Image (spheres, coloured by chain):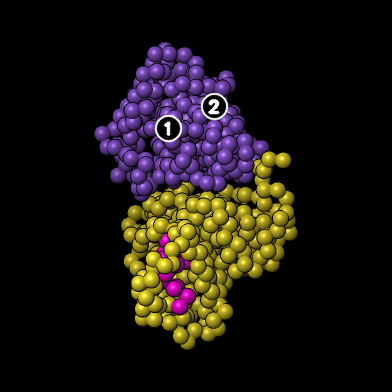
Amino acid sequence: MTRYFFGETRRALCGVYHSPRAECAQDAAVLLCPALDADAARSQRVLRELARRLAWQGQHVLRFDYSGTGESEGATAPGLFVRWMRDIDLALAEIASLSNARHLTLFGVRAGALLAASALASRVAPVTRLALWDPVVSGAGYEARLDDRYPADLRRNVRFTDLRHDIVLPATLPVRLLVTDPQRDVDELERRWGERGLGVSRRALETRLDWAQHAPPLAGGEADAALLEALGATVGGP
Amino acid sequence: MKNVPLQFGRGQALAGILTLPEREAVPGPALVIASSRGAGEPHAGAWVTELARAVSGAGLTVLRFDPCGSGESAAVPAGEAVHEALSRDHFDAIDAACTASQRGAVVLLASGAAAASTALAAALAEPRVCGVIGIDGPAFDTPGPLVRRWLDRLDIRGRGSARRAPATASASPMAPRPDRAAYLDTLQRLVERGTRIFCLYTGASGARTLRHAARLRDLMPGLRPPGHLRVGVLPDSDNAFAHAADRALLVQACLDWLGLARTPGPPPPGADP
């Protein structure tokens, strides 16, 4: 596991690269797009464990923080939504260059799913699979949960982004959903994307997470074994 | 300002980020910030990074680190109690900060009663610690402030505040509440040694009504010299400093206590022209 900064000078992104176990290295890589704010704090540890697990199974994994969040540099100034899209581009280029892998999974958690899918929709990227964990399907309503340090235009951009209507993904792109907090809009997302010809598969956990509730972080240890198993299968499985 | 990721401690188990001043460093200690309250606890929040950048912008080196079992650091070693691990993490972080900054002294900053108490105990055992900032550290009732608090409550409706921080602080399960006598003894010995202490309380610890400064004065009437122990209150802040204005107050309070002036300097990294 190597933590380092990459990207533009003075706007460097903090990333953590998990190199694959040498004896079983695969031609596959994963880019993890984290959630934001409280969701990020809650899921950080379990994503770290997931990345370690995937690397143990032979995949290259890169985690990173968006500009102005976590340990990444950059101010939370106007234009942040566009910059976050560019951050995902930069991180995709970084993992592609680190891994040289032909199979690249883009994995987004909560608002990270909204950002990841939006980033994919607006550009050509070498992504071969999209995986989403409890995606924030519509930013309307969710933007109220965002930290007050973000600029108003970011809130606007998030508020008016809706994965059901605005996002057009390549029709051949396989999409995997992991649902641990069942919401009606996720069902609708699955249906709409299915109607557009996307191959959407869904996995659900019996143990329900409620992201709206304040809860201790997901430890990623024994207590979250079923969750880790499901995440591993969603992101890294065949 | 330059950020350098660091792995340190036994088996390189601890992860941290060293923030080095971009311009010439000012004389003074390195600041060591625990990014969480310990194992199983979430990151303390954006204030950690903002404070590190502000302090490094004013000329000091800052190491912010994830205690074992949190953030990017390894899990707590099997068989080790969480609060013992946190204590060892502080010693490792002090070593790492002194080595990286080439300074012989550090100031520790920890948030939460158990973590602040652990930082104070580490300071007592480690002579290179010249100061401790404890955010919402332990507090104990004394008769005077207790009575005044009850009197205040009788009149609480007349004292309405525009914005009152939610009481989100809770005792951390990772360590027992520090013993009152032992805590006071630690404080006294640190002050006698010349270690400066800044006890900063937020609204989450009841800073509006609990009269923390008066309680400390009551607890330690013979405390000399008093200048070594400062109490600050941010009654409208919550302990996550979720609002930008609260983070600005925290940063200013820490810079003041460290004797640093916030310098305008170059635009913050990433700021749009």
Q: Eyeballing the image, is B169 above or below A48?
A: below
Q: Residue at x 38, y 62 (%)?
A: B83
The residue that mark 2 highlights is A119
Q: Please, what is the three-letter code of the amino acid marked with disc 2?
A: Ala
Q: Residue at x 53, y 57 (%)?
A: B246
Residue A45: x and y, percent? 41, 44
Q: Specify the subunit that label 1 lies on.
A: A
Q: Residue at x 46, y 17 (%)?
A: A173
User: Secondary structure beneath disc 1?
Assistant: loop
Foreground tag (2 vs 1): 1
User: Alpha carbon of mark 2 to alpha carbon of mark 1: how far?
Assistant: 14 Å
Asked if the magenta segment contains residue B248, the reply would be no
Q: Specify the subunit that label 2 lies on.
A: A
Q: Which mark is residue A136?
A: 1
Q: Eyeballing the image, is B240 above or below A107?
A: below
Q: Nearer the viewer, residue B10 or B29?
A: B29
**Colour of chain A in the image:** purple
Q: Which chain is yellow?
A: B
Magenta region, residue range: B200-214
Residue B230 seen in render: yes
Q: Residue at x 41, y 75 (%)?
A: B183
Is B172 situated left or right of A168 in this image? left
Q: Nearer the viewer, residue A198 or A13?
A: A198
Residue B61: x and y, percent? 63, 59
